């Protein structure tokens, strides 16, 4: 595998972070008070076309960037994204089973990521469990992420698949 | 016995070797993340973490500002379309509020004169005279759990850690990270931020904490008088300049023996509508002392007198 897919994936993550922090959120696009996890959708889409090690590093970098630009302690989203990518790596061979399986997988990983972040935050003394409407804040973004993945996955496939045929590990 | 231990150690090493490269990397990254979080929490937002954040904001900030210029109209359009059903309700609510405010306006002038007299008597610096820096929000937190906003003014413009951020409705939050050209505001809705408040009706003090997503929670220990729905809460001057609107009590509550009074508060600010804010410079918690004079703001072309 050349460095191109990794570079493209990183570029996509950066674009996703900029869109996430400027388009989605309170006062911007936030239907029913929740926003999709666009960055996670992009990372999961890229994981399908990357070798395991670059995929894990991509997840870590993405999470770390979210930590740096957000309000949480460094490392919490990085930890969450690393776990999400690891789970995705173990499940990606099921991607050929159809769109429903992919949607369930993305939704499940998004749910797990939100839950894991809350757990990690609580362990590190953050008072996020006091947030009102917590269930809504965990479930709705996961659902929206599935919807967003419907647009992101074909785009990433178009950008990455052509040049990485034969390197897709199962 | 010794052979048994050796064989157990060998088995353990063998089991580690059985991890493939990706699992080893996964565990290493997990450990690194854990260490980062530990150090960052212990550093309390300073140190290497702060430097990294400033660096990241230095890189992303200009692009985010550019992107916001593009996405703001799109977001506004989508927000408008999604809220079209609620507009009629909003108009009716505003009409009622307008009538109420018109009635209140009559009493305000006499109250204002009285406040001025009292401020002169107590040698207090009126909040309206504190210098502020206008700023615009250009980026939000990347997830719904991040109750933070990034503003386009930073250290170069006179913004410093801990300064209060307000808008025309009241207290927005507090500066908790400053880069050269931008700064991060932790909103009052963040569960990690608490604000000392005074109930204008009872003069009792307590504090409000964010609950995320807009609501606040008022807590008062040893409150002798109950709070009523509609009571206005303002900052008490301990960590924020005194007299800034924080919110309105939603439900009446009374402190029971040995327990804190706890009730919900509607914030004075309307978070989704906040675009421009003001950073209050030239006031520090030390100014709250009776003998101390409000600190002189640095000469800055962006500073405006309110």
Image: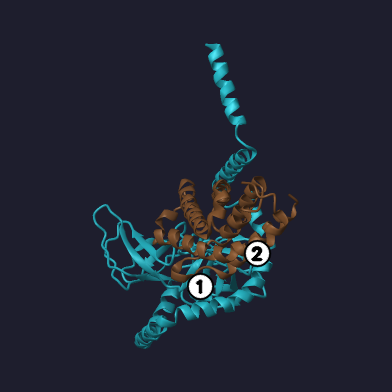
Chain colours: A brown, B cyan
The kind of secondary structure element at disc 2 is helix
Q: Position of residue A85 (x, y in %)?
A: 58, 49
Work out whether disc 1 and disc 2 sit on a shared chain: yes
Which residue is at 62% across, 50% downward? A60
**Residue B276 percent location from the top left of the image:** 56, 75
Q: Nearer the viewer, mark 1 or mark 2?
A: 2
Examine the rendering and report whether any part of residue B47 can be seen.
no
The residue identified by callout 1 is A27
User: How many marks overall?
Assistant: 2
Is residue A114 or residue A158 the one in the foreground? A158
The disc, 1 or 2, on the residue closer to the chain's N-terminal end is 2
Q: Position of residue A55 (x, y in %)?
A: 64, 49
Image quadrant where one finds the C terminus of chain B: bottom right
Residue A63 in the image: state x and y as whole percent: 59, 53
Q: Is residue B158 left or right of residue B170?
A: right
Q: Which residue is mark 2?
A: A15
Question: Residue B243: which quarter of the image?
Answer: bottom left
Is residue B103 visible in the rendered structure shown here? yes
């Amino acid at each position: 595998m050349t460095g191109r897919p990794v570079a493209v994936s990183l570029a996509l993550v950066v674009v996703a972070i900029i869109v996430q922090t400027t388009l989605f959120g309170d006062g911007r696009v936030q239907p029913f008070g929740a926003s999709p996890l666009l960055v996670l959708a992009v990372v999961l889409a890229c994981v399908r076309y990357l070798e395991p090690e670059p995929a894990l590093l991509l997840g870590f970098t993405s999470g770390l960037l979210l930590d740096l630009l957000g309000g949480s302690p460094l490392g919490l989203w990085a930890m969450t994204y690393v776990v999400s990518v690891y789970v995705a790596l173990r499940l990606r061979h099921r991607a050929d089973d159809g769109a429903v399986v992919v949607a369930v997988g993305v939704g499940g990983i998004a749910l797990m990521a939100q839950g894991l972040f809350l757990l990690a935050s609580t362990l590190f003394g953050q008072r996020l469990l006091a947030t009102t409407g917590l269930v809504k804040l965990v479930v709705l973004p996961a659902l929206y992420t599935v919807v967003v993945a419907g647009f992101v996955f074909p785009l990433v496939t178009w950008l990455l698949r052509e040049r990485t045929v034969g390197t897709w590990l199962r | 016995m010794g052979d048994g231990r050796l064989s157990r150690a060998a088995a353990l090493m063998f089991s580690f070797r059985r991890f493939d490269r990706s699992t080893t990397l996964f565990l290493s990254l997990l450990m690194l993340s854990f260490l980062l979080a530990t150090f960052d929490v212990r550093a309390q937002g300073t140190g290497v973490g702060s430097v990294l954040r400033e660096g990241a904001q230095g890189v992303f900030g200009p692009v985010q500002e550019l992107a916001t210029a593009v996405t703001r109209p799109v977001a506004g359009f989508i927000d408008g379309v999604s809220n079209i059903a609620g507009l009629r309700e909003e108009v009716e609510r505003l009409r009622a509020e307008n009538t109420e405010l018109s009635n209140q306006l009559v009493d305000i002038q006499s109250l204002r004169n009285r406040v001025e007299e009292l401020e002169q008597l107590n040698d207090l610096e009126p909040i309206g005279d504190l210098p502020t820096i206008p700023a615009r929000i250009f980026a939000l937190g990347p997830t719904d759990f991040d109750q933070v906003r990034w503003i386009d003014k930073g250290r170069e413009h006179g913004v410093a850690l801990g300064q209060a951020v307000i808008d025309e409705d009241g207290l927005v939050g507090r500066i908790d990270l400053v880069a050269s050209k931008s700064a991060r505001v932790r909103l009052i809705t963040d569960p990690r931020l608490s604000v000392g408040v005074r109930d204008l009706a009872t003069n009792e003090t307590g504090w409000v904490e964010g609950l995320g997503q807009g609501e606040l929670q008022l807590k008062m220990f040893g409150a002798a008088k109950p709070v009523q729905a509609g009571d206005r809460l303002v900052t008490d001057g301990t960590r924020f300049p005194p007299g800034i609107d924080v919110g309105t009590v939603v439900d009446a509550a009374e402190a029971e023996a040995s327990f804190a009074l706890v009730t919900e508060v509607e914030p004075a600010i309307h978070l989704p509508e906040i675009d421009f804010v003001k950073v209050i410079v030239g006031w520090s918690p030390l100014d709250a002392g009776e003998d101390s004079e409000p600190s002189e703001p640095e000469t800055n072309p962006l500073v405006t007198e309110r």
